[in-house]
Amino acid sequence: MKQNQRLIINILTLLIILVGGLGISNLLVKYFSRENGSPLVQDTFLLTKEEIISEGEESAEEVFRDNGEPDGEAVKEDSISSDEEKDFVPKIAFIIDDLGYERQIAQEIIELDFPVALSILPYLTHSEYLAEEGKKNSQEIILHLPLEAHNSDADPGPGAIKSYMSEEEIREAVRKALSAVPYILGVNNHMGSKITENRAMMEIILEEIGRYNLFFIDSLTSENSIAYKIAQEMGIKTAARSVFLDNENDLDYIKGQMEEAQRIAFKKGEAIVIGHSRINTFYALKRMVPELIKAGIEVVPVSELVR
């Protein structure tokens, strides 16, 4: 009997020691976890509201990257702060530059089922043909006026206006270029970083454009361009480029630029996007513009955004 009692006492003693040891171990884990700044094991499953929101935003970005389409609602909510502002309709206008060199991709762009302004260079093989095709498809036609760049190695193409020209030579060059492309409603500059920074030359160019009651869009090929400002001063309907779509001929880059245009449109109410006649640009427009429209953006002719 005494042996049994002694055995029971020993077992109970061992159990007490084990329980006590586990408790002390747990306390030690908690203590050292706090001292080292690391989260407790049970805390790793607890997320704050801010962390949950952050996790959700990252997931949305992953979806965008996978699907190749901007998350319009996320951009919209990020840009609009009040209930009253949610009623406005942001607008985007697309311009495709450098048209006239080729026909195949240009034709695909012309036949897109939303407005795309066709910016056509003068004197090229396909310039007049593309203007005719654009007119048939109810696309707006504008002249892509070649101007001299700071980079002397850059060739603006035939009919370019150069800084050494006299006033009369400039006027004559502008008039000839305007008559070389039919159906034009406006003008934007091709290259021209050297000219768009020059007040005297831009005043001459814009005066000729104004004679034909055309609008002018500053492509902003130079961050120091004053062309838009001068056009405003002269009372010519004008606007300035918001985003270059395809400075890199890469679908991921173009996708990112499209998302940037969407953000600008929701923030400022409108954006003018300039791209080029390239197959990747065509694919991006065909796939992503319908998503912009679903997100609440109106795609409009560029003439609606000049003032």
Image (cartoon, rainbow, N blue to C red):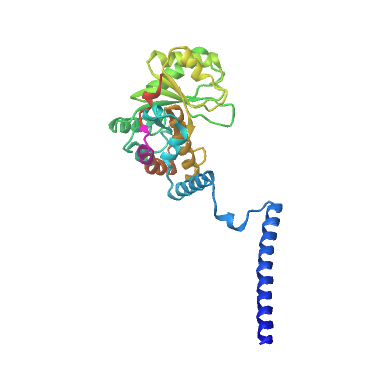
Position of the N terminus, as image quadrant, is bottom right
Residue 125 position, x and y percent, is 39, 33
Residue placed furthest toward the front:
1
Residue 164: give x, y in percent of width and height: 57, 18
- Residue 42 left/right relative to 210: right
Q: In this view, does 195 lie above or below 137?
A: above
- State whether residue 208 appears in this view: yes
| Range of magenta residues | 290-298
Q: Nearer the viewer, residue 179 or 115?
A: 115
Q: In which quarter of the image is residue 283?
A: top left
User: Which residue is found at the position 38% from the left and 18% from the top?
Assistant: 214
Give the quarter of the figure containing the C terminus: top left
Asked where in the image residue 19 lies, by quadrant, the reply is bottom right
Q: Which corner quadrant of the image does residue 154 belong to?
A: top right
Membership of 62 in magenta stretch: no
Q: Position of residue 233 (x, y in %)?
A: 48, 12
